[in-house]
Image: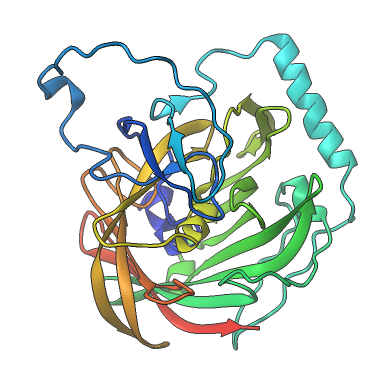
């Protein structure tokens, strides 16, 4: 099984597919949500599954005046214009000056690390394993001290444990935690972490030990950067990005088996990464029939992604019985967790926490699901 398929073990850690493409939704005016990044809107049927080339040509419209930026103030309405979907932010080769600038920024970030080692994780559940970080190329933001979470966020002190199942077979275990608060470029941020482990029976032929970090702005809930560190069989990949909004660019490193190389690109709006997007959705008011649209940056690609709010449903797991809201991220292409034409559904508790208690996606044969086993709120 290819590593991108077995990464389903880390389903909860990175709940959205990487590298998906989506058609561009139209700009729409919606009541401002608090807090809310600049690149989000609510719309109905924002993505149409029908390819654009098969659609009838639209009727000619009179040219509209160029929109002017407005300062976002609740509860006034804001108009959001999303960029073209699937934009390859490095479609054109960087100039030598751009490459040198990105290299300098990475070096400066390394030099500014506050700690000599990342803040250590701790065991939260019985029989929980911790992933050693030696030999992994981490985001410099991982070397910042952690503070207790004193915010009113619904995930304050939250720690979750999941069983990962291939059909009815236990394939592994995943953990998702709010590690606490840290400081990134003068802003408070949640350090969100997921770890994923393949079961012992799978370890024998395809050992999985994956870890993801995401730094979520604690005030406005947009991403300040992420880390993906993948160890699956003989495959490994370490990738991290810092979203530098004042400089209007992102930069980071990608390392597989070869030496690490710099990745960078333009950044003209507040965005989310895969893990932080789950928390952003949890912070929204979810209404059946209304969609949430936001921009993702992952692997140097930026694209809008639509999360459809489908229905309400009661779910029972080992952690208890929960009244839930079912949401479905919309995929238009191949992704890590979802093959083309397949769907991923997520069950969030219908309360102030919106805790993810179940996820399920169809695969080539059967299905893969993640179900909540235990949870803690400290």
Please indicate, yes or no, whether residue 233 appears anywhere in the rendered image. no
Residue 74 at what x, y percent from top left?
Answer: 53, 50
Q: In which quarter of the image is residue 35?
A: bottom right
Residue 235 at what x, y percent from top left?
Answer: 53, 48
Q: Is 14 in front, or is 59?
A: 59
- Colour mapping used in the image: rainbow
Number of labels in the image equals 0
Quarter of the picture holding the C terminus: bottom right
**Does 191 sit above or below residue 228?**
below
Seen from this angle, which residue lies furthest front?
Answer: 76
Residue at the image point whose x is 68% and y is 80% from the top:
123
Q: In which quarter of the image is residue 150?
A: bottom right
Q: Is 65 in front, or is 265?
A: 65
Residue 319 at what x, y percent from top left?
Answer: 42, 87
Residue 336 at what x, y percent from top left?
Answer: 39, 48
Please indicate, yes or no, whether residue 109 appears anywhere in the rendered image. yes
Left-right relation of 362 to 346:
left
Residue at the image point whose x is 28% and y is 40% from the top:
46
Q: In which quarter of the image is residue 287?
A: bottom left
Residue at the image point whose x is 54% and y is 40% from the top:
38
**Does 23 sit above or below residue 154?**
above
Q: Is 323 in front, or is 242?
A: 323
Residue at the image point whose x is 49% and y is 39% from the top:
39
**Does 177 sit above or below residue 45?**
below
Q: Is 240 in front, or is 351?
A: 351
């Amino acid at each position: 099984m290819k590593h991108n398929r077995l990464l389903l073990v880390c389903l909860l850690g990175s709940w959205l597919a990487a590298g998906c493409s989506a058609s561009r939704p139209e700009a729409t005016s919606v009541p401002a949500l608090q807090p809310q990044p600049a690149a989000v809107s609510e719309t109905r049927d924002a993505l149409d599954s029908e390819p654009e080339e098969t659609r009838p040509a639209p009727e000619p419209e009179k040219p509209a005046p160029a929109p002017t930026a407005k300062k976002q103030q609740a509860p006034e309405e804001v108009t959001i214009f999303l960029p073209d979907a699937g934009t390859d932010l490095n479609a054109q080769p960087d100039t030598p000056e751009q490459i040198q600038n990105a290299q300098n920024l990475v070096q400066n970030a390394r030099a500014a690390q506050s700690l000599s080692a990342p803040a250590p994780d701790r065991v939260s559940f019985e029989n929980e394993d911790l992933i050693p970080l030696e030999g992994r190329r981490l985001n410099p933001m991982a070397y910042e001290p952690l503070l207790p979470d004193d915010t009113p966020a619904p995930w304050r002190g939250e720690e979750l444990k999941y069983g990962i199942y291939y059909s009815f077979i236990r394939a592994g275990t995943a953990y998702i935690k709010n590690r606490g608060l840290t400081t990134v470029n003068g802003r408070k941020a949640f350090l969100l972490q997921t770890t994923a482990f393949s079961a012992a029976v799978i370890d024998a032929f395809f050992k999985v030990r994956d870890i993801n970090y995401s730094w979520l702005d604690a005030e406005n809930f947009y991403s300040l950067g992420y880390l993906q560190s993948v160890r699956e069989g003989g495959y490994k990949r370490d990738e991290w990005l810092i979203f530098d909004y004042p400089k209007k660019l992102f930069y980071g490193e990608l390392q597989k088996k070869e030496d690490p190389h710099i990745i960078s690109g333009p950044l003209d709006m507040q965005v989310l990464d895969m893990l932080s997007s789950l928390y952003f959705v949890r912070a929204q008011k979810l209404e059946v029939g209304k969609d949430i649209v936001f921009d993702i940056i992952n692997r140097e690609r930026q694209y809008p992604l639509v999360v459809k709010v489908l229905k309400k449903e009661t779910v029972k797991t080992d952690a208890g019985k929960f009244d839930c809201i079912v949401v479905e991220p919309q995929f238009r292409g191949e992704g890590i967790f979802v093959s083309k034409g397949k769907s991923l559904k997520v069950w969030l508790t219908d309360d102030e926490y919106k805790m993810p208690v179940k996820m399920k996606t169809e695969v080539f044969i059967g299905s893969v699901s993640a179900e909540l086993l235990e949870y803690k709120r400290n």
